Image: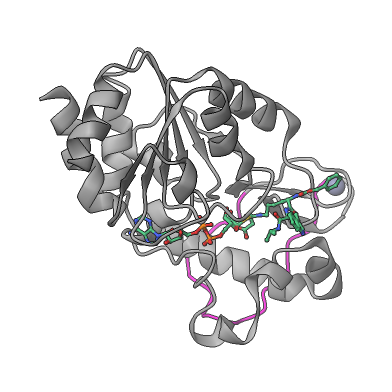
Amino acid sequence: MALNDAAKLLAQARHVVVFTGAGISAESGVPTFRDALTGLWSRFDAQALATPQAFQEDPDLVWGWYEWRRQLVQRVRPNQGHLAVARLATHVPQLTVITQNVDDLHERAGSESPVHLHGSLFSPRCATCSRPAPLPAGDEQPEEGRRVPPPHCAHCAGLIRPGVVWFGEQLPEAALESAARAASECDVLLTIGTSGLVYPAAELPRLAARSGAAVIQVNPQPTPLDPIARVNLVGPAAEILPGLVSAAWS
Ligand code: BV8
Ligand code: ZN
């Protein structure tokens, strides 16, 4: 049965990579990228809003969207899926957590320094001189769809932007390099809650499979990664992961 097969692969693994997408945060109440734009945001397309062009054209709208998302993340909690991933570290000789998510739920669940391929909502920086900027004080959540003018850089007065990787922007080189090295060296890559559509991140599970790793997928929906998954656990992460970890090390 698929769960036992996955548990056996995990229990025997020396180096496990966990690769997560927006789906692992869905059960915490963080909308996935596909359905991030609900309510008043629904008139926008995330892929159009998550671009340097959008910020150029309407910085207040883009800053307002990210501030709304950051405040939302601050109000929710890691779920049983994030906690199970954190527990893996106590069982697996070597664990590398790689996330495409810009929330801090892996950290808050206890995962040490996950690799953030697409940056973070919690590391704003100056769009002009790239100096890191402080997070805005206060925690009132801007209401959905409201424009919020971004702060200005204390050093050069440039506009502050979210510390995320937008479409058309390069991923942080060090993060991508360490992620690719881990994917090519691991015995098992556990891909959780990602549609496997966004590159170059989506290349990682394929790289792991090509390098001989067993890929285990956790997702309620079919994805383009199905053909390379040794085991496909169909269902929500917060339900599947705790059972998987206890089946492997009970
Ligand atoms: C770059 C941060 C180049 C921002 C994000 C054509 C072909 C190939 C590539 C391209 C192309 N045209 C353009 C490109 C490049 C582009 C790309 O890949 N586009 C795609 C759409 C085709 N990539 C880029 O632009 C990247 N940069 O290539 O630079 C370059 C080279 C040289 C010089 C300059 C530039 C940058 C990509 C990073 C974009 N930023 N995030 C923000 O968050 O606002 S990506 C963003 O979308 C998310 O981070 C996420 O990774 C991704 C996908 O969003 P979602 O679908 O929500 O999330 P996910 O994919 O994880 O899917 C949710 C899944 O969860 C689903 O499968 C669902 O079934 C599942 N699920 C739901 N509930 C649960 C669940 N699973 C488990 N449990 C549940 N309960
Ligand atoms: Zn500056």
Whether residue 145 appears in magenta in the rendering, the answer is yes
- Front-lying residue, 183 or 28: 183
Whether residue 49 appears in magenta in the rendering, the answer is no
- Residue 54 in the image: state x and y as whole percent: 79, 70
Q: Quadrant of the N terminus?
A: top left
- Front-lying residue, 8 or 57: 8
Residue at the spot 86% in from the left edge and 68% down from the top edge:
56
Residue at the spot 50% in from the left edge and 22% down from the top edge:
212
**Is 189 on the left or on the right of 176, as rendered?**
left
- Residue 242 in the image: state x and y as whole percent: 20, 41
The picture quadrant for ligand 1 comes to: bottom right
**Is 224 on the left or on the right of 171, as rendered?**
left
- Residue 9 in the image: state x and y as whole percent: 29, 25
The part of the chain drawn in magenta is: 135-154
- Front-lying residue, 34 or 31: 34
- Residue 250 in the image: state x and y as whole percent: 10, 25
- Front-lying residue, 201 or 64: 201
Residue at the spot 70% in from the left edge and 27% down from the top edge:
174
237 to 159, vertically: above or below = above
Q: Quadrant of residue 57?
A: bottom right
Residue at the spot 47% in from the left edge and 38% down from the top edge:
19
Query: Which SS type dominates the magenta stretch?
Result: loop
